[in-house]
């Protein structure tokens, strides 16, 4: 309430201001839920290991087991996805730990860790990784106008 010479005026927000505040609160709640879902501290026990290309395309399950078993017990076998014709690694693998704490330790310690002078990427399992597991991964290409197709930022983010 605002007072003017013993007269008081009650100020209330307009409907537009209420709608704006409600929309902002909804966006904030959605962002908090997304951060909680993908934050390493609240992640699932399954992790993604990327960057297994070049010198690392012949990596074996037991090699990754030796590296990642240090952080905790691995629940099941390590899933390295391979080309069915060549048998070479497609560049990524998935590891499932028995505890979330083990997965968090592995992510913190092994992300950007170098194997044979090549950095690997280790992150929490996320929704776009399901496409990789199911084999439905498609690269989104854009026409650059110079008779070439380029990857979009979204497709590069999904690949890395």
Image (cartoon, grey):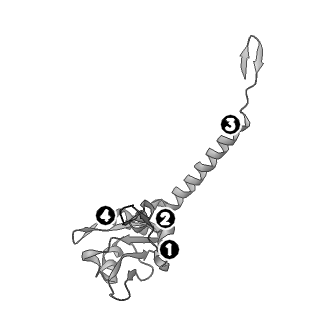
Res. 44 in view: no
Q: Quadrant of the N terminus?
A: top right
Q: Which mark is residue 43?
A: 2
Task: Give the residue displayed 72% in from the left and 34% down from the top.
Answer: 14
How far apart are labels 1 and 3 at the CA level? 40 Å
Which of the 4 image quadrants contains residue 122?
bottom left
What is the secondary structure assignment of the residue under circle 3? helix
Task: Give the residue displayed 37% in from the left and 83% down from the top.
Answer: 82
Q: Which mark is residue 130?
A: 1
In the foreground, 89 or 78: 89
Query: Which residue is tagged 3?
Result: 17
What is the secondary structure assignment of the residue under circle 1? helix
How far apart are labels 4 and 1 at the CA level? 22 Å
Q: Residue furthest left?
A: 117
Answer above or below: position of 116 versus 9. Answer: below
In the foreground, 152 or 147: 147
Relative image position of residue 33 (x, y in whole percent):
57, 56
Answer above or below: position of 54 versus 43. Answer: below
């Amino acid at each position: 309430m605002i007072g003017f010479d013993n007269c008081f005026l009650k100020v209330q927000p307009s409907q537009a201001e209420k709608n704006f505040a409600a929309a902002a609160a909804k966006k904030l709640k959605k962002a908090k839920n997304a951060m909680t879902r993908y934050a390493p501290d609240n992640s699932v026990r399954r992790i993604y290991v990327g960057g297994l290309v070049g010198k690392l395309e012949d990596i074996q399950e037991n090699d990754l087991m030796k590296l990642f078993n240090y952080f905790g017990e691995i629940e099941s076998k390590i899933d390295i996805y391979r080309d069915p014709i060549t048998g070479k690694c497609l560049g990524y693998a998935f590891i499932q730990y028995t505890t979330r704490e083990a997965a968090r330790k592995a992510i913190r310690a092994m992300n950007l860790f170098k194997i044979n002078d090549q950095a690997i990427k280790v992150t929490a399992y996320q929704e776009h990784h399901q496409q990789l597991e199911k084999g439905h991964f498609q690269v989104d290409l854009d026409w650059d106008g110079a008779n070439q197709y380029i990857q979009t930022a979204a497709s590069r983010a999904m690949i890395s």
